[in-house]
């Protein structure tokens, strides 16, 4: 069998029990605590004190000492014994008479309490009464009758009789239910109602009618066909039957096992799956009984204890892959009396062992769940995979071992696909427990193992692991990642361990092509890292390298730095600009950053940027092969800079621009110098861009008063009307468009003074109409404002008059109500509540200095 659930241990040897009386034999036994009682064939009752001892090797032995013996003065064998510890009594059935003996000295009770005509009896283990000083028994008589008695220390009081259809042979009782074996059939009887329920017949010639209580209102009966049948008080079976020997003569129950005795063997069956688990040879067995969690078996001359082995020793079937059965037993073993701590340790270990068995069967989901439930030390699992544990780990596997595998090769047995599955399972399991309590104390082992596994098969997960908080061992990472050519990940690991110099060396070698790693993002990653690096000395070591690779990208080392970073001498803008002179594109990008992003209002930065923009335009213009779009873009950038900034040195830039044909830029610069006439003449006569001229007036008058705005449009109109610059009347159309524009603003009277006398009223009709409307609107608005002002003035006069109606008289006798001092001059303050005070005493006009009352500061509210 696959389980050793019990082992036989001698309890009382033959010579110690019976001496030389060879004809005497054991008829019945009873055990209560450490007290063992034996009834013999020659009418003796023996009392032994039985001690249970555990030897250093874990084995249990019994030592016995006889306490007393009693001859019952009859020549009949003792049929049955039952202990009632609460009453300190022994119930003895001999010669079909039930009597009481003292539990310790075996003396009869003087009251003479006895019941005659008894063939068998049983004690109710689940009585309905709660009296602790009485027990309830059921008695089988030679008549077709079962009687229920209440037994006390000195009395046996009949309570109920239950009539049955045949003579009772054996019986058991639980609560109100009595299970009775008659001469050919089993029945259930309710002691309260007398109701009978027929069960099934049995063959009396071939089997002994056995009735055994195995639980609350549940019994085990020896049925036909060598079956053990489970029956509940409702007359139904909730478990499959047990298959045992046809010659079974005794049965005992100790959860989760049923032990059956026949003439040659003790067989052990599980109530969890009804399977036979163990067979113990035992010749001449006559009596088998369970007593308060102990099982004893006796031959005619000797008594043995059937000692349950520790549950972990019972689980030998783990080697046979019977995991479900092992776990079921382990979870139910708590019911047999182990402490909570012992049970917890045992269950966790069994779950761990079961997890490795499921792994060996490639049941990955089940294995992972068992490992989690069993709180497995994750190093036990990692250690199966060679070279995954950190090199610094001194882990040793559990003793005794949780499995029989030296390493994972004994699990996958050369099947490469299975090995891949096992590694995938390990990765998933480590990921699942990484941020749970199961990882406490083992984060380095978990992360280092994940790093090694990711390096083999999952570069994306590897990058994510070493980029965030991790416990990967650097020494292992250097060896593993270099071997797998995961140089970018190694650089990230260096960075996490604050060795930024080695990280940058690796990344630079990848960019330079010395090393190859497809997971590396490129130069921009290194630039971003340098931009965030606060070690300025290390930053400057790589600045020149980055600028040589890509000047516009390399300059981001300076432009993308955090605003919260303290400025050091090496990161001052002037220092950076001086260094970047060798890289024109880079210095332009950096100056743009200072001017447009940082918005530094320093003239040298703005002038420098404007000069660089201008030089760029001039260089492109000199290149005859340069496309027009490139020229336009460069000039647009320059114009935007010249227009938006007001800090650069305008005369310097103008002196350079005047030497070129860049008329639009000249116009902007003249505008910065407030030489608007020159600027507008360039736009009108040289560029002939009338829309730009009008837009010039709008832009340059932003934030200025209306008079300034009118002056600019007046200048533009004058340029259009000036005959000195071209053919007379050639600019009449743009002049009229300007006069009629909704955006333009003019002083109509001054316009009328400069307009040519030759222009007709029809030509000016739209302008005149708009001017008249604006004049009328302005006049009406002025009148409205005048009327509103008069209303406010009248209201204030009313207030003054109302205050003057009640004169206030100040005399030498009058005192200030705040300081109680007289007034020395006629200057005073009066509050709305009538309080009069010196001006120096009235610190707050809204708060009375005497009462503290707050008055509204707005009149009329």
Image (spheres, rainbow, N blue to C red):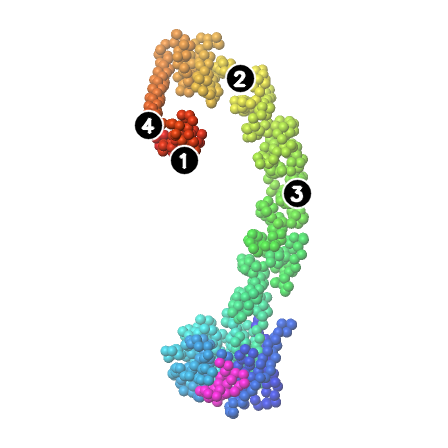
At mark 2, the secondary structure is loop
Residue 246 position within the rendered picture, expressed as x and y whole percent measured from the top left: 50, 80
**Residue identifier under label 4:** 806
Q: CA distance from mark 1 to mark 3?
A: 74 Å
**Residue identifier under label 1:** 850
Q: Is residue 487 visible?
A: no
Question: Marks 4 and 3: which is nearer the front?
Answer: 4
Disc number for residue 673:
2
Kindly indicate whether the residue at mark 3 contacts the one at mark 1 (C-beta within 8 angstroms): no
Give the magenta-colored segment's residue range: 87-115
Within 10 Å of disc 4 (Cα), the crowding (few <14, some 14-19, many 20+) is few
Q: Earlier in the sequence, mark 2 or mark 4?
A: 2
Disc number for residue 499:
3
Disc number for residue 492:
none
Report the front residue among 429 and 722: 722
In this rendering, the answer to whether 68 lies above or below 510 is below
Residue 51 position within the rendered picture, expressed as x and y whole percent measured from the top left: 59, 78
Does residue 204 show up magenta in the picture? no
């Amino acid at each position: 069998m696959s389980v050793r659930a019990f082992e036989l241990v001698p309890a009382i040897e033959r010579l110690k029990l019976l001496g030389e009386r060879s004809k005497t034999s054991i008829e019945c036994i009873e055990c209560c605590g450490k007290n063992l009682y034996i009834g013999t064939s020659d009418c003796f009752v023996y009392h032994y004190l039985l001690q249970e001892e555990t030897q250093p090797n874990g084995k249990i032995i019994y030592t016995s000492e006889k306490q007393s013996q009693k001859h019952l003065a009859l020549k009949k064998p003792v049929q049955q014994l039952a202990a009632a510890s609460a009453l300190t009594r022994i119930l003895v059935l001999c010669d079909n008479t039930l009597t009481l003996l003292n539990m310790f000295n075996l003396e009869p009770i003087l009251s003479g309490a006895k019941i005659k005509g008894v063939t068998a009896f049983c004690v109710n283990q689940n009585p309905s009464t709660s009296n602790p000083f009485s027990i309830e028994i059921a008695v089988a008589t030679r008549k077709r009758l079962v009687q229920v008695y209440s037994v006390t220390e000195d009395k046996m009081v009949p309570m109920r009789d239950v009539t049955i259809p045949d003579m009772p042979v054996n019986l058991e009782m639980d609560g109100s239910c009595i299970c009775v074996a008659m001469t050919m059939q089993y029945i259930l009887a309710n002691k309260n109602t007398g109701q009978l329920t027929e069960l099934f017949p049995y063959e009396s010639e071939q089997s002994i009618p056995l009735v055994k209580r195995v639980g609350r209102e549940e019994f085990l009966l020896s049925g036909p066909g060598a079956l053990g049948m489970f029956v509940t008080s409702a007359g139904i079976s909730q478990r499959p039957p047990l298959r045992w020997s046809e010659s079974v003569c005794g049965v005992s129950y100790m959860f989760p096992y049923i032990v059956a005795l026949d003439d040659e063997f003790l067989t052990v069956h599980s109530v969890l799956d009804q399977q036979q688990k163990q067979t113990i040879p035992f010749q001449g067995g006559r009596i088998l009984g369970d007593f308060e969690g102990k099982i004893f078996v006796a031959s005619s001359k000797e008594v043995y204890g059937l000692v349950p082995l520790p549950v972990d020793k019972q689980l030998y079937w783990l080697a046979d892959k019977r995991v479900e059965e092992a776990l079921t037993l382990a979870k139910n073993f708590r019911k047999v009396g182990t402490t909570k701590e012992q049970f917890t340790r045992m269950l966790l270990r069994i779950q761990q062992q079961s997890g490795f068995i499921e792994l060996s069967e490639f049941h990955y989901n089940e294995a992972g769940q068992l490992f989690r439930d069993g709180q497995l030390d994750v190093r036990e699992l990692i250690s199966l995979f060679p070279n995954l544990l950190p090199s610094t780990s001194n882990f040793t596997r559990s003793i005794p071992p949780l499995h029989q595998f030296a390493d994972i090769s004994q699990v996958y047995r050369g099947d490469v696909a299975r090995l891949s599955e096992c590694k995938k399972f390990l990765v998933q399991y480590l990921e699942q427990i990484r941020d749970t309590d199961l990882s406490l104390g083992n984060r380095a082992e978990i992360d280092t193992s994940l790093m090694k596994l990711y390096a083999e098969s999952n570069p994306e997960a590897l990058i994510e692991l070493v980029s965030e908080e991790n416990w990967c061992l650097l020494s292992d990472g250097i060896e593993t990642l270099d071997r797998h050519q995961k140089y970018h990940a190694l650089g990230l690991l260096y960075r996490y361990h604050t060795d930024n110099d080695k990280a940058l060396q690796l990344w630079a070698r990848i960019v330079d092509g010395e090393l190859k790693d497809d997971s590396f993002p490129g130069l921009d990653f290194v630039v971003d890292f340098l931009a965030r690096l606060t070690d300025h000395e290390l930053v400057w070591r790589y600045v020149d390298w980055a600028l040589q690779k890509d000047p516009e990208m390399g300059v981001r080392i300076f432009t993308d730095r955090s605003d919260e970073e303290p400025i050091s001498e090496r990161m001052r803008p002037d220092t950076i600009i001086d260094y970047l002179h060798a890289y024109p594109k880079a210095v332009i990008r950096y100056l743009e950053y200072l001017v447009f992003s940082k918005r530094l209002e320093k003239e040298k930065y703005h002038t420098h940027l404007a000069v660089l923009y201008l030089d760029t335009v001039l260089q492109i213009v000199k290149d005859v092969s340069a496309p027009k779009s490139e020229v336009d873009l460069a000039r647009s950038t320059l114009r935007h800079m010249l227009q938006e900034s007001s800090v650069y040195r305008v005369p310097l830039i103008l002196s350079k621009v005047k030497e070129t044909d860049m008329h639009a830029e000249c116009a902007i610069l003249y505008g910065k110098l407030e030489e608007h006439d020159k600027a507008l003449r360039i736009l009108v006569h040289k560029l002939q861009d009338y829309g730009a001229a009008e837009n010039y007036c709008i832009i340059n008058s932003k934030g200025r008063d209306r008079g300034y705005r009118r002056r600019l449009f007046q200048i533009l109109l004058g340029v259009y009307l000036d005959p000195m610059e071209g053919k007379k009347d050639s600019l009449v159309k743009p002049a009229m468009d300007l006069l009629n524009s909704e955006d333009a603003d003019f002083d109509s009277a001054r316009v009328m003074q400069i307009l040519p006398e030759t222009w007709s009223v029809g030509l000016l009709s739209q302008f005149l109409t708009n001017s008249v409307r604006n004049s009328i609107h302005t006049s009406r608005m002025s009148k409205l404002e005048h009327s509103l002002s008069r209303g406010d003035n009248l209201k204030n006069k009313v207030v003054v008059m109302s205050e003057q109606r009640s004169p206030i008289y100040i005399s030498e006798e009058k005192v200030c109500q705040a300081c109680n001092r007289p007034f020395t001059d006629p200057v005073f303050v009066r509050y709305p509540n009538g309080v009069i005070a010196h001006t120096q005493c009235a610190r707050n006009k809204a708060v009375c200095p005497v009462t503290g009352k707050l008055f509204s500061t707005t009149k009329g509210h």
